[in-house]
Image (cartoon, rainbow, N blue to C red):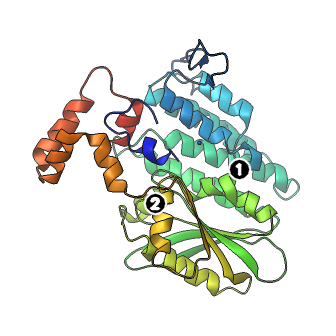
Amino acid sequence: MKSASLLLCFFTCSSFVAGLPHAGNKIHVAQPAKRSNSSDPGSILQLSSDEDFHFELLRPLGLIPYEGADVGEVLVAADHIVAGDFDSWYNAFIALADRVHDQASAIDSTRYPVSARNALFREATYYRSADFFLHGNWNDSRINTLWDKQLTAFHKAISLLPNPAERVTLQANGFQIPAYFFSSGQPGPRPTLLLCNGFDGSQEELYHVIGAAALQRGINVISFEGPGQPTVRREQNIGFIPEWEEVVTPVVGYVLSRGDVDAEKIGLFGLSFGGYLAPRAAAFEHRIAAVIAFDGLYSFGQAMFTQFGPQLEALYRAGNATRFDAAVRGFLARRTGVPTSARWGI
């Protein structure tokens, strides 16, 4: 969900919208929250002295209005995170996720569906958060284990909605598209919003970002993921493709096959890097009536090259993979001055 320009700062920029750690782990206490500019009393209060950690802590907080998290739980997790320490981030959020999992498991969902759903949604969010900084090693078994846990919790939660969501798998050209269809429950064909996340975000997150809000306003919602995005990357081992219309067109075809969708009122919402993917798809898929690029990006490649700088760009354009990779490894090997965003991005 990092903004388009900030998402791409892999190399040169310095930054980029409870429970205790497991028994036996050393408990680290984060530095006290501080203002980003002490000379300005109006500056924002940071939740971590690492600006990227601060941003990622704001991410679950932003999901609170629609059942995605709880402010007290996130702040407790933040207090056990050491700035810039990826392991401490994982430890804080896995402890929180496991704690909320135990709470959700203890609730009789038949008698108390709202309470159960709320806990399950929070559980899913915290497992996703625990996963976020693990990707330096794709052989790390936690990457798939955490994702399975967040999916299990989310699927249980959406089955407890007043109008339970439908899980569908759509066939595309050489890959499958996992999707959720959420009905507004209102009579007649309804306007329908397609939700597409970006580089690192999941479709489950999008339910809390905008999906629930659209449903409350009488708009059907379908979220989906394509190549490169979390579930497709893990389960089908497929990376990003530029031809995002190959993802969106089967989704449009599916919603048009339903009787509860107004064919003249289909919208497409793209968040973060999705702000590039969605307009790209709409340039070829003409059955879409409106597009929202929430972080529009004209050229992903040019934005990346701008961050590389001229020397690294020249190595890349020359096709010198050996020297390019060596330069990147050398950058990461610096003992100081490597931003969290660069370590995460590379």
At x 63%, y 34%, the residue is 96
**Can you see residue 105?**
no
Secondary structure, mark 2, is helix
Q: In the rendered view, does 165 fall on the left or right side of 318?
A: right
What is the crowding at mark 1: few (fewer than 14 residues within 10 Å), some, or many (at least 20)? many
* Residue on which the image places disc 1: 120
Residue at the outermost right position:
111
Secondary structure, mark 1, is helix
Q: Which mark is residue 91?
A: none
At x 67%, y 38%, the residue is 61
* Residue on which the image places disc 2: 276
Q: In the rendered view, would you say 257 is above or below 270?
A: below
Between residues 304 and 66, which one lies in front from this camera angle? Answer: 304
Between the residue at mark 2 and the residue at mark 1, the CA separation in whole angstroms equals 31 Å
| Disc 1 residue type (three-letter) | Leu
Q: Position of residue 299 (x, y in %)?
A: 37, 57
Between residues 256 and 108, which one lies in front from this camera angle? Answer: 256
